[in-house]
Image: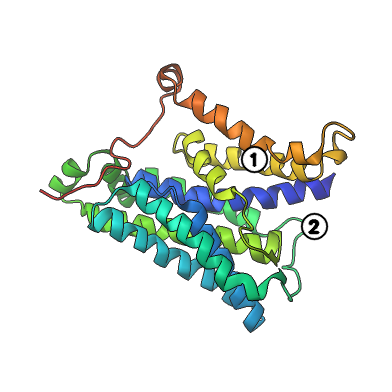
Amino acid sequence: MWELVARSLEASTIFLFAALGELIDQRSGVLNVGLEGLMLFGGTAAFITAQTTGSHALGFLAGLTLGGLLGLGHGFFSITLRGDQVVSGMGLWILSFGLTTYLGSPYTGPLGLGRIPSLWGLSPFFPLGVALVAITWLLLFRTGLGLAIRSAGENPAAAEASGIPVTSIRFLCVALGGMLAGLSGATYTLSYNPVWNYNFLMGWGFVSLALVFFSMWNPWILLAGASLFGIMWQLSLSPELILPGVLSRYVWRTVPFAITIPILCIISTPWFRTRWGLAKPEALGRPYAKG
């Protein structure tokens, strides 16, 4: 049972890292629906680097770096060129699906390195994820920079008039968001499931994107949601540990994605928004042109 819990918490950190980066993006007013693409690129870069150098640390560094650069690339199209953020994000995802398949194909198979040390079977990335949640909450709600980020996402024109450099703030956020997405992908390929194959994520990035909306843009609710989905995902892989003989494991694997749909439908209703005060950034997804 402890093994199931430990693996579930490790799975939850992958959702958490990516979703936390997207939460920071969205708080500044930038939407990136290509989150899975950043994770694919980060995970592939990390795997190839670690496989060729024999170093986990260099692998994670590669994932973080490429994720940050691609986050800036999305920022260039959506912030500087003021393009449609959904189109830019989807283009990034489509590019990642094809390019990572091409670049990673020669490395298909298991990672030829030992496993990252754990503490009583628990991945070190889970406490790191909890720490990042606390840091993000403090940043957004207890610092001047956090106020600037939230202002850029709510009313960029008013923020600019008060002296906040909206463009710079948004670029900072997309870079941080990209790095966390790259870290998420690297954690998947170097720790959680150190075997590379094309499209290895199978929708994890889209679940992470949905978790941001589910969390009402609150890091602590995001942690709870990521933990829930991590448990559901791990249970879908080994349902016989809890519910032996109940449905096929292939049916269970659809559960995390099937639950995502009604959650998004519920939180988008006027009743939910009124009852729970959904804190959607007012300028989310809207390009800003400095007057």
The residue drawn where x is 41% and y is 64% is 70
Image coordinates of residue 104 in percent, x first then y, are: 60, 71
Q: According to the image, label 2 marks what residue?
A: 120
Q: Does residue 202 sit above or below 151 in this rendering?
A: below
The residue drawn where x is 82% and y is 47% is 2
Closer to the eye: label 2 or 1: 1
Q: Name the amino acid type tagged 1.
A: Phe
Position of 164 compared to 94: left or right?
Answer: left
The residue drawn where x is 32% and y is 40% is 284
Question: Tag 1, which secondary structure?
Answer: helix
Image coordinates of residue 203 in percent, x first then y, are: 59, 48
Residue farthest toward the bottom in the current orientation of the protein: 53
Image coordinates of residue 134 in percent, x first then y, are: 51, 48
Position of 150 compared to 102: left or right?
Answer: left
Camera sees residue 181: no
Q: Name the amino acid type tagged 2.
A: Trp
Position of 187 compared to 269: left or right?
Answer: right
The residue drawn where x is 71% and y is 58% is 123
Q: According to the image, label 1 marks what residue?
A: 229
Image coordinates of residue 18 in percent, x first then y, are: 52, 52
Quarter of image, res 191: bottom right
Q: Does residue 104 sit above or below 153 in this rendering?
A: below
Residue farthest toward the right in the current orientation of the protein: 245
Q: Quadrant of the N terminus?
A: top right
In the drawing, what numbered circle is on residue 30? Answer: none
Camera sees residue 255: yes
Question: Tag 2, which secondary structure?
Answer: loop
| Between discs 2 and 1, the one toward the N terminus | 2
Q: Would you call the spot at circle 2 few (<14 residues within 10 Å), some (14-19), or many (20 or more)?
A: few
